[in-house]
Image (tube, helix red, strand yellow):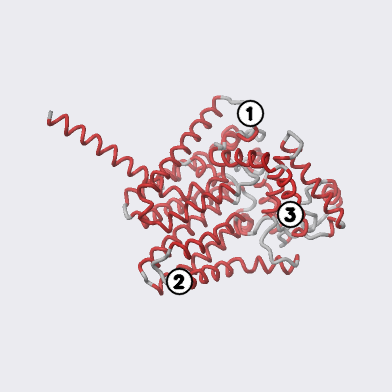
């Protein structure tokens, strides 16, 4: 935990987020959006990106083919928990980016502790649990996350809690302690709901958890399995119910977010007849806007109506170019798995707000200075090491905890397959978090094998 704290603080102090000039580094892209939403929430009490439409905002929106947010429209793309987190800190410290990042860094110690507890529950060996926690402490993506204002770190925090309570739930179900695992099933649902309110990707976990309970827990009677699933669903709805109801009350839709349709359309830009990514994204949104205008005034549609048109436009483009899309999507999955986050680290370390993002899918190598090469090689090799140790851990220790192993493997596969638009390294963070206990177990087994091999060689040399 001390190593985890020191490494994150080193990056924090190097970036100096309390300085005015750091604003352009820390508040570009999505972080700037969360920052603005938090400010609007504090100033107006409304969860909206542009709560009070002004003529300039209206004119800009009318000219923008995306129409992802309209002036005066309540937010429907991002669930509210991360914005509430930022707004809560701002309300106590003033508008200080550094306060948000420092709070995240401190909370990352809880994630390290939870990784340790999960591994200890799974493999019952403190040495393996310590290795898993150490891997989390020094993993580059996990060092980067709390030093950025993306919702993904708080999502990782809730995901680590979910991992712990779900493992606890499965262990209690296996032991037949009914009164206790019913409670832990409910807690699993509550924490899952909180994770979803932080990041839309959390919704993926809901059907996977139900499937794992239903299919893998065969030592438990079918009636009790269904009861456990019902408790998970109850906890989930208790956490997310207000958000669903809010969307129904405002938009007339029992829906969670427009994010999946928005991301699908951005992903479909891979088959657009434009080479530059920015222009291809604008092209696909222009096609969607033309469809909206055929059905009425886009500015009178609610965001979920526009999202349905985004989805139909994307699916039609994918059907028209299936082979091209699948090839591009495969490159995107490889990018998500290995992209080093070079530009993010470089932006913080050099305070350069405009840096090139290394993207494998573009099939070209950007300008690579010494710092970029060091970051690139270090992160790629380390990620390969974690994956290989994770696979080794699954093969050597996975059978001991099969329900959780299935949960990890299914979830990692689904997370990779559904990376449909974003290639930022934070997209692989949930996968790494789930694999870390197995990576620790794999590293421990590898260490034992090597130690045994050297011991045998020493014995043979002594006898000779």
Q: Residues within 10 Å of mark 1 (few under 14, many from 20)?
A: few
Q: Nearer the viewer, mark 3 or mark 2?
A: 2
Q: Nearer the viewer, mark 3 or mark 1?
A: 1
Q: Looking at the image, is mark 1 or mark 2 earlier in the sequence?
A: 2
Point out residue 299 in the picture as x, y percentages from the top left corner. Answer: 84, 56
Q: Is residue 442 left or right of residue 190?
A: left
Disc 1 target residue: 364
Q: Is residue 149 left or right of residue 69?
A: left
Q: As displayed, is residue 409 above or below residue 369?
A: below
Point out residue 11 in the picture as x, y percentages from the top left corner. Answer: 52, 39
In terms of image quadrants, where is residue 81? Answer: bottom right
Estimate the spatial distance between the alpha carbons at disc 1 and disc 2, rounded to whole Å: 53 Å
The reply to whether callout 3 and callout 2 are in contact (CB within 8 Å) is no
> Which residue occupies the foreground of this view, 326 or 347?
326
> Which residue occupies the foreground of this view, 40 or 250?
250
Q: Looking at the image, is mark 3 or mark 2 earlier in the sequence?
A: 3
Disc 2 target residue: 222
Disc 3 target residue: 49
Estimate the spatial distance between the alpha carbons at disc 3 and disc 2, rounded to whole Å: 47 Å
Q: Residue furthest left?
A: 463
Estimate the spatial distance between the alpha carbons at disc 3 and disc 1, rounded to whole Å: 35 Å
Point out residue 402 in the picture as x, y percentages from the top left corner. Answer: 40, 56
Q: Secondary structure at mark 2?
A: helix
> Which residue occupies the foreground of this view, 177 or 76?
177
In terms of image quadrants, where is residue 305? Answer: bottom right
Q: As displayed, is residue 418 above or below residue 370?
A: below
Q: Residues within 10 Å of mark 3 (few under 14, many from 20)?
A: many
């Amino acid at each position: 935990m001390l190593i985890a704290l020191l490494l994150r603080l080193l990056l924090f102090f190097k970036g100096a987020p309390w300085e005015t000039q750091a604003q352009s580094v820390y508040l570009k892209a999505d972080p700037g959006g969360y920052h603005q939403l938090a400010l609007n929430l504090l100033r107006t009490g409304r969860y909206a990106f542009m709560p009070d439409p002004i003529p300039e905002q209206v004119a800009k929106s009318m000219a923008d083919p995306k129409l992802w947010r309209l002036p005066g429209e309540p937010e429907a793309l991002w669930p509210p928990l991360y914005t509430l987190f930022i707004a809560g800190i701002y309300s106590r410290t003033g508008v200080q980016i550094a306060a948000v990042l420092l709070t995240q860094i401190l909370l990352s110690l809880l994630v390290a502790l939870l990784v340790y507890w999960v591994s200890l529950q799974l493999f019952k060996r403190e040495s393996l649990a310590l290795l898993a926690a150490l891997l989390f402490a020094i993993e580059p993506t996990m060092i980067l996350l709390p030093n950025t204002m993306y919702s993904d770190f708080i999502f990782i925090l809730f995901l680590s809690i979910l991992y712990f309570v779900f493992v606890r739930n499965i262990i209690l179900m296996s032991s037949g302690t009914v009164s206790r695992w019913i409670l832990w099933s409910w807690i699993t649902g509550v924490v899952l709901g909180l994770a979803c309110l932080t990041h839309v990707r959390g919704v993926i976990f809901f059907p996977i958890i139900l499937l794992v309970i239903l299919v893998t827990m065969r030592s438990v009677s079918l009636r009790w399995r269904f009861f456990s699933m019902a408790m998970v669903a109850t906890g989930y709805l208790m956490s997310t119910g207000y958000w669903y109801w809010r969307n129904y009350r405002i938009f007339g839709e029992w829906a969670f977010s427009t994010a999946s349709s928005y991301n699908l359309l951005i992903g479909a830009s891979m088959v657009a007849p434009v080479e530059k990514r920015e222009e291809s994204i604008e092209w696909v949104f222009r096609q969607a806007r033309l469809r909206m205008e055929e059905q009425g005034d886009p500015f009178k549609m609610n965001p979920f109506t526009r999202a349905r048109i985004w989805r139909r436009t994307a699916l039609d483009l994918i059907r028209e170019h299936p082979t091209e899309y699948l090839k591009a999507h495969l490159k995107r999955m490889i990018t998500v798995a290995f992209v080093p986050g070079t530009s993010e680290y470089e932006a913080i370390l050099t305070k350069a707000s405009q840096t090139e993002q290394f993207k494998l899918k573009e099939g070209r190598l950007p300008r690579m200075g010494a710092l970029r090469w060091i970051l690139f090689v270090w992160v790629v090799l380390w990620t390969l090491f974690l994956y290989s140790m994770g696979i080794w851990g699954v093969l050597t220790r996975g059978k001991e905890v099969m329900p959780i192993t299935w949960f990890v493997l299914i979830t990692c596969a689904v997370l990779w397959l559904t990376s449909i638009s974003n290639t930022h390294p934070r997209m692989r963070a949930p996968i790494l978090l789930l694999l870390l206990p197995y990576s620790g177990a794999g590293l421990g087994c590898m260490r034992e094998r090597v130690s045994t091999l050297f011991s045998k060689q020493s014995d043979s040399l002594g006898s000779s």
